[in-house]
Amino acid sequence: VRRLVASQLSRAGFDVESVSDGREALALVATRPYNLIVASITLRSLDGPDLAAAIRALPERRTLPIVLMSSDNNPARHQRAKEAGVDVIIRKGSFRGQELANLALTLVASQSQATQDSRSDRRWQSRPNAS
């Protein structure tokens, strides 16, 4: 599944880094800029919901889109993931062709627009009043 996801995202123009466990993913996210995180809900050493919570705890990564892929239908785990700040949970094997890439492009574009809007709002708020 990891190779398939990497291939789909690469074809869509993303630079993809693939890791095998949650702690390694968190170490990279904490030190490098990313536009999107796609991870399994069940990772070794740090599962998807815990990875999402740790990413959301990093001030500069609070709005980073996070997609978790799940092969189970565990409502409690999915709820924990949503509460941790996961944007989308998709079922492994349920996406076809370009669907994952389209989702990724949409999330990145939305996050980029939100970041630009936030910067614009801060600039407007920081302008002194003209008297």
Image (cartoon, rainbow, N blue to C red):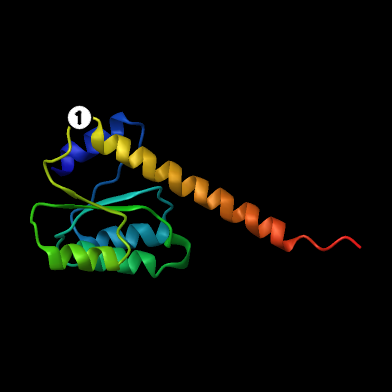
Q: Amino acid at mark 1?
A: Gly
Of residue 49 and residue 11, the one placed in the foreground of this image is: 49
Q: Which residue appears at 41% of the width and 59% of the height?
A: 31
Q: Which residue appears at 57% of the width and 49% of the height?
A: 116
Q: Which residue appears at 39% of the width and 70% of the height?
A: 57
Residue at numbered disc 1: 97
Q: Which residue appears at 14% of the width and 60% of the height?
A: 42
**Above or below — where is 66 with respect to 131?**
above
**Quarter of the image with the C terminus in it:** bottom right
Residue furthest right in the image: 131
- Rendered location of residue 34, percent (x, y): 40, 50
Of residue 10 and residue 119, the one placed in the foreground of this image is: 119
Is 33 positioned to the left or the right of 10 in the image?
A: right
Other-residue count near label 1 (Cα within 10 Å), few / some / many at <14 / 14–19 / ≥20: few
- Rendered location of residue 98, percent (x, y): 25, 30
- Rendered location of residue 19, percent (x, y): 23, 52
Regarding residue 15, the answer to whether it shows in the image is no
Is 122 positioned to the left or the right of 88 in the image?
A: right
Of residue 103 and residue 21, the one placed in the foreground of this image is: 103
The kind of secondary structure element at disc 1 is: loop
Please tell me in which quadrant of the rendered image residue 25 appears: bottom left
Regarding residue 81, the answer to whether it shows in the image is yes
**Quarter of the image with the N terminus in it:** top left
How many numbered marks, from 0 up? 1
Is 110 positioned to the left or the right of 125 in the image?
A: left
**Above or below — where is 92 with respect to 29?**
above
Please tell me in which quadrant of the rendered image residue 118 appears: bottom right
- Rendered location of residue 8, percent (x, y): 24, 33
Of residue 131 and residue 26, the one placed in the foreground of this image is: 131
